[in-house]
Image: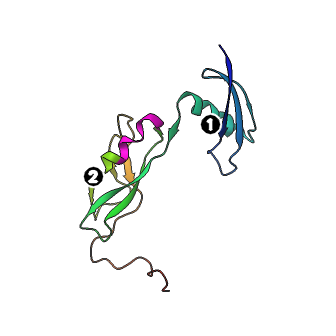
Amino acid sequence: MVKETTKLICITCPVGCRLEVTHEGKTIVKVEGDECKKGIDYAETELSDPQRMVFTVVRVKDGLHPVVPVRSTEPVPKAKIFPIPTRSREVALAATVARPQVGMAPAESTGNGVGHSARPPPVGSPPTSAPVGES
């Protein structure tokens, strides 16, 4: 098999190491530029089964705000990410749900749910912060 070199930026921690990964198919031969073991683990995962956390919004019924942010409960394979925001348009949460609650499960045959990350306040609730420009 032919050796290839792939350049990656590790997204595991804030350092953002620039990795140069030499591999034969999905078998890693050498990783350069990693500052810690997380870089090597990231390179292995990125070449064999790249995954990401998914963030989107869903509608809120009878809520102070029309939408609430949601995220996947686990990383999702990259090939299955794009249907999730489309499916989220079909979901509407009640404004009184407790946090965290899974709003869509499982996400695109991954076994991962999508739960909201903030409790949506019901209509008539006082603002949780001062409007912009006021304190």
Q: In the current view of this chain or complex, which residue is farthest to the left?
A: 62
Please give the name of the residue rendered at 34% of the width and 53% of the height, measured from the top-left corner: 101
Q: Amino acid at mark 2?
A: Val
Magenta stretch: dominant secondary structure: helix
Tell me which segment is drawn in magenta.
77-85
Residue labelled with disc 1: 42
Is residue 28 shown above or below 12?
above
Is residue 18 shown above or below 29?
below
Is residue 47 shown above or below 133?
above
Q: Report x, y in % for residue 110.
A: 39, 35
Alpha-carbon span between mark 1 and mark 2: 33 Å
Callout 1 environment at 10 Å: few (<14), some (14 to 19), or many (20+)?
some
Q: Amino acid at mark 1?
A: Tyr
103 is within the stretch colored magenta: no
Give the quarter of the image for residue 18. top right
Q: Report x, y in % for residue 10.
A: 65, 42
- The numbered dot on residue 91 is 2
